[in-house]
Structure formats: structure tokens, C-alpha cells
Image (spheres, rainbow, N blue to C red):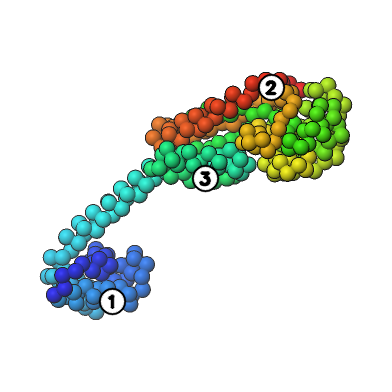
Amino acid sequence: MADHLPLTALRAFEAAARHLSFQQATAELNVTPAALSFQIRQLEQALGEQVFIRAHRTVSLSEAGRRLLPGVRDGIDSLRSAWRAAQRQAQDRAVSITAGPAFTSKWLAPRLFNFARAHPDIELRFTATLRLLDLRHDDVDVALRFGPDRAEGFFSGVLLREWLTPMMAPDLATAYPTPESLLQAPLLHHDETAFMHPPVDWAAWFRTAGLPPPPAAGVQFSQADHALDAAISGAGVVLGRYTLAQDALRSGRLVAPFALSLMPRESYRFLCAPGAETRPPVRAFLDWLQDEAAPLAEQEAGRDFRTEW
């Protein structure tokens, strides 16, 4: 008699014994009848006794099967409970986050090493999309969104205030040293200014600076981070979003030589379903976000912010 535990065969036996039907057991386990019969034969060979009495179109438990079933059932129930507990624990350590592609690549991604180092037990799962998600029903814990300061029915808070100002590579700054000189500069445009109300575009900045309208020509990008990459390469001057450009500004790959900056009504906010903010991994992530955002306000010194144009 073998002394090892044929776990797969025991699982097959428990299903067949519970249903007293090989056909129903195969449907539950998603196996073929031949595979189920093979597992039962393996169990009987290991046990040295038959566990089922097979008759025409019926099956019943043998004496050995009746002795075996209660312990096998309890064991499988314990395994299922342990598995569910492990799954819940894994879920409790995970935080699912959605943010826009540009914000994810330019602001979040460069900082995530700091979070991982401080919280090695928390797993972050990102979805980079601008699609609106239902935080109560979709598999998302936290949404980071750029928009107006309205979030009825959610736990929310301001993460970052956005502002836009001309940005360029250092070499271009010597060629265009004054706001007036930008009338001759190659201007880069991006569609994301249209999401702000009123739009924060080159026309708004030149108008606020008391200058004639800028040339309409220029390279157009659908994404603000692509326009920033072009500016870093020296392709032109971009009305850059500070939240996306601050790493490039800090490293000197971009400069923002003019104080005039437009601050839209919209801001970056974090949102989650009511009550989710109390779950420890979510709370840790939100606290970390605010800690990372706090030093950025120091770089606003000397800026001439305008909120109307």
C-alpha cells in the first residue's frame, strides 16, 4: 500500500463522491471522463481497495470510500479556505491605479522606485489611460486625473496645481532671450491645452504678455509629453506643462526663462471610492503621493502666475 497522498486523485474522488456521478464530476473539474476514471483508478491502486461500487448507470461508495470521504472533504475544504485567505491577503497588499499616459511616464514612473523601496510589501498595478472608470465597480482603487475641483461622491484631494510657461532647450534660450523674440521662434503645440477651460495655449500666453498673436504655424502633437520631448531635442519652444516637465527643468534639459505662467482652473487630483482611503496600502500610496508633490511648490518661487487671460 502506497503511503503518499495522491492529491489530484483525491480531488477527483471527492467530486465524484459528492455528486455520486462521474459525469457531473467531470463537468465540475473540467476534465474528460477518461481522465477522471484514470484518477480514480490511481487512487484505488494507491489505497489497495475500491472506493466506488460501479453498477449499470449508477455509482455508489464502497465501505472504503465511505471511510475516506469525510477526511478528504474536510481536507479539501481547508485547502480552499487557505487559498481564499491567501488571495485576500495578496489583494490587501495591492493597489490598482489609473492615470493618464503622459502623467504616468513623466511624473509617476520616475518616482516609483522610492515608493517600492519604502513599501516593499505593497504591489502597485497601473493602467495608463484617459478613459473614465467607475471606481465603485471597475477593478481600480485610485484614479489620478487632471480636471476641475469637483468630485461629488468620492474621496478626493488636490495633488498638484498645474501651470504652463514657455520652455526650451538651453541653446534655444540664448537665441530667444525675450518674450517678444518668441514671435520668431519655432513654436510647438499640443492638443492637451484644449482640455482646459478656457484653453491655455500660445494665443492665451501671448495675449496675457501683451504681445501680438503668435504665428499659427508650428508642429502639432496630440500628447503634451511628446511636445516636451521635441523641445528637449531642440526642435522648438513649447508651452510646457510644469507637472510633466519639472524633471527636465530640474536636470537642465529644459529651461523656463520667462516668469509669466498661466495657471488653469483644473488640477491633478486623486480620487477613490468613499472608505477606500482607509485601507492601509491605499493610505500609504496617497500619503506618498502628497510627500512627493510637496517639494514641487518650492519651484514656483519667482513665477508671475495668472489665472485669467
Q: Which residue sits at x=63%, y=33%?
A: 250
- Report the quarter where the N terminus lies: bottom left
Secondary structure at badge 3 equals strand
Q: Nearer the viewer, mark 1 or mark 3?
A: 3
Tell me the residue that label 3 is attached to.
Answer: 126
Question: Quadrant of the rendered structure where residue 212 is?
Answer: top right
Question: Which sits earlier in the primary sequence, circle 1 or circle 2?
Answer: 1
Where, by quadrant of the figure, is residue 123 drawn? top left
The amino acid at mark 3 is Phe
Query: Measuring 81% from the left and 26% from the top, which residue is drawn there?
Result: 178
Separation of residues labelled 2 and 3 (CA atoms)? 33 Å
Count the labels in the image.
Answer: 3
Between marks 2 and 3 in the image, the one whose residue lies nearer the viewer: 2
Establish if 146 lies above or below 67: above
Q: What residue is pinned by disc 2?
A: 303
Task: Report if residue 238 is visible in the image.
Answer: no
Is 144 left, or right, of 221 in this rendering? left
First reached walking from the N terminus: tag 2 or tag 3: 3
Which amino acid, mark 2? Answer: Arg
Of the pair 45 and 238, the residue shown nearer to us: 238
Tell me the element at label 1: helix
In the rendered view, does 287 fall on the left or right side of 144?
left
Quarter of the picture containing the C terminus is top right
Q: Do the numbered discs 2 and 3 sit on residues whose CB atoms are within 8 Å?
A: no
Quickly name the residue at label 1.
38
Image side of residue 231 versus residue 107, left or right: right
Q: Which of marks 1 and 3 is nearer the N terminus?
A: 1
